[in-house]
Image (cartoon, rainbow, N blue to C red):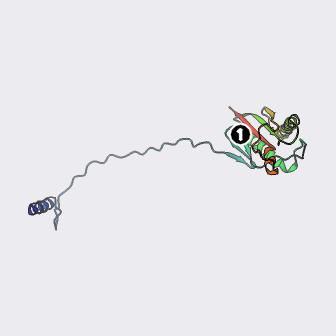
Amino acid sequence: MRKEHSSVAIAAVMAFGLAAGGCKARIEAEPVTPVVVTTVTTAPPPQPVATGDAILEGDRIRIVRPIFYDTDKDLIRPESFPVIDAVANVVNSHPEITALLVEGHTDSQGNFDYNRGLSERRANAVVAALSARGVKIPMRIAGYGATNNVCHTPDEACLQLNRRVEFRVERK
């Protein structure tokens, strides 16, 4: 049986022109159908839009540095002016933003009602500063006091995280 398989294999090789010397048979080429490659582009996911110290992300403007006030005051400190400028630039360069909510937060030290009032006054100071920088869309404020803290330990670093201003946007 082994011999039969070997001679069958040799005969097959010779029949197809694969033996030494080979066969010079002409092979007809099949017609080639061109392949059309279509590129489908989809819109990339919305990327954050940064303008200095402020970044537009979805329904928020995230600031990369806090807005500073003196203790127990609603006057914005000068080192925070670049942050206010950046928020104004984001709002003014995005006509799809139709309204802005400025949310003020405080730490948990002090009286609840006092902190709520302080957070409202600070948010109002930001609205006034944005208006002075040419922001013309409707702006509202919300003063939360210490009701929406992001940190709950009594150390200074945690208290500082809770003293913040956040921005929500409405779009067309």
Decide if residue 66 is in sight here. Answer: no
Q: Position of residue 163 (x, y in %)?
A: 81, 44
Q: Quick check: 34 left or right of 103? A: left
Residue 149: image quadrant is top right
Position of the N terminus, as image quadrant, is: bottom left
Mark 1: few, some, or many residues within 10 Å (few <14, many ≥20)?
A: some
Closer to the camera in the image, 113 or 60: 113
Q: Position of residue 66 (x, y in %)?
A: 79, 47
Q: Residue furthest bottom?
A: 20
Q: Position of residue 75 (x, y in %)?
A: 90, 43
Residue drawn at (82%, 50%), measured in percent from left and top?
156
Decide if residue 100 is in sight here. Answer: yes
Residue drawn at (71%, 39%), measured in percent from left and top?
60
Position of the C terminus, as image quadrant, is: top right
Tell me: residue 13, above or below residue 131.
below
Residue 124: image quadrant is top right
Instruction: Identify the residue position indicated by label 1 in the image.
Output: 60
Q: Position of residue 162 (x, y in %)?
A: 79, 44
Q: Quick check: 153 left or right of 57? A: right
Q: Amino acid at mark 1?
A: Arg
